[in-house]
Image (cartoon, rainbow, N blue to C red):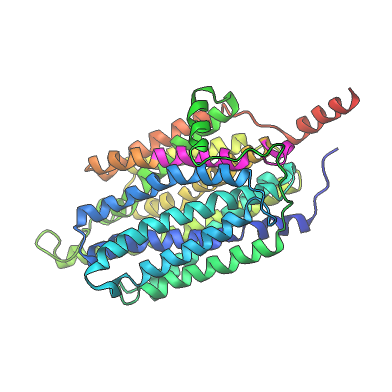
Amino acid sequence: MAPTTTFKDYLWCLFLASPWIGIQCLWATEFGVLNTTMEVLGLPKNWAKLSWIWGPVTGFFTAPVVGAFSDVCTSKYGRRRPYMIGGLVSFAIASFLFAFCQHFGSLALPVGFISYIALDITINVIQTPIRSFTSDMVPEHLQNTAQLMAVACQGTGGIIGTQLQANLYKNNLETLPYLIITALALNVFFISLVSYFGTEQVYVPKDDKKLSITEPFTIVFKNVSNIDRKLASIFATQFFSWAALFAFWPHATSWVIENVYKGCVGDISDKCPADLHQIGLDGNKAAADASSFQNIVQIVFGILFGYLLLNGILKSVKYIYAAGLFLGCAILVGTNIFFDKTYATIFITLMGVQMSVMNAFPFAIVGRYNSSDGGLSTGVQFGMMNMFICSAQFIVQFIVFAIPEYNTSLLVAGCFAGTAGVCALTIVEFPDEAIQSDAEKADKK
């Protein structure tokens, strides 16, 4: 017999996922201002572009450490909340330093650059415990719904971040504090709210052994070659799906401007005359509008499929996961065939489907794997998933910078998405009925 679910369960999942509104708002604002801020502070343009490399580097090391330590945290406040609040405090410090870096005189560039790296580290400190906290706080049959609510909240945060950037930030350091501090306030509100009302049980370990700072890496790297089949399929899917996304993000807007609108990127110059510059601005606005549609797709996808799964209308997500990745493959490859404005809008908008499935289903499936033991390995496994995401970003960053043609970069992204779709078909999923049946057999024995 399937577990009974109510609309209250749906709202509970949405509440637990609400911190992603603030987190995604920050990612959206950071993506939009980083290059400009670094260049204004005096960092050469090429070096400013390479600033993005610190995201995957810090995430690769931070996520598994925080995940492993949160798994065995014995604080009276629970396993995840101390890291969520501690990460939030350090995140606030880094935000203030980054927002007001221009006031440090000759140290403005180093303070801005170091505080940006600190921002990436603190966001990663917060993300893995929040993913794990959400997974811990819901039973096995609500794992998919909870992670889909996270997708809806990410879409909401993306829209808020885009609008904040459009209305508060004027491409200068004077308006930077308004943008960053507002994004910080959203994170403080949602993370504090969830931490206060989402109470955890105190973890009591079976022994008094303490986890050393190096042990998470020892555990991860020793077992990479021995990862079981079900995790290997998910990790491979994560790697290729995020490789597709990181090959898509840097070039999508430029593809719209140059290949579709036939404008140019950059300031007015001999290489970019005034008429082509204006066309380029029109293309940039079209891409920004499509990005807003993309966020709406994430919201609708998360709410709709969360409802269908919650009410038992859908039980399996593996084929939806694969279909979303194959859709991404098709529309990315289509950028080498279609160059009209309508397709450009459809292309960026529908990438929201791929982003939805890859942000929800792998985390939900791993959460289901760990539901039976109270999530004792959820943190470290989510951290390992983040390692594969960061590895993809690190590798692809160098690939896309080496490819001069936007079409070629998006074609490579399509190949990655197709490979991810094939990997998704090999995932071992635990349907609710099968888990319950196994439990009943065990009880009879």
The x and y percentages for residue 361 are: 59, 42
Residue placed farthest to the right in the image?
Answer: 444
Q: Along the line of sight, which residue is nearer the eye, 313 or 79?
A: 79
* Residue occupying the point 47% across, 56% down: 122
Which quadrant would residue 426 be assigned to in this image?
top right
Query: Is 294 positioned to the left or the right of 425 in the image?
Result: left
Magenta span includes 376:
yes
Q: Position of residue 439 (x, y in %)?
A: 82, 30
Q: Quadrant of residue 362?
A: top right
Q: Is residue 412 above or below residue 186?
A: above
Q: Is residue 299 visible?
A: yes
In the rendered image, residue 121, in percent from the top left (x then y), is placed at 43, 53
Residue at 40% x, 47% y is 58
Q: Nearer the viewer, residue 386 or 25?
A: 386
Q: Main secondary structure of the magenta part?
A: helix
Does 325 appear above or below 32? Answer: above
Residue 251 pos. (x, y %): 31, 49
Left or right: 195 as drawn, with respect to 108: right
User: Can residue 287 be spotted in the picture?
Assistant: no
Using residue 307 as the reference point, say whether residue 284 is left or right of it.
left
Is residue 391 one of those drawn in magenta? yes
Q: Which residue is drawn at 47% across and 30% down?
A: 221
Q: Quadrant of the N terminus?
A: top right
Going by the picture, which residue comes out furthest to the left? 270
Q: Give the range drawn in magenta.
A: 370-392
In the picture as drawn, the residue positioned furthest to the front comes out as: 208
Q: Is residue 194 above or below residue 241?
A: below
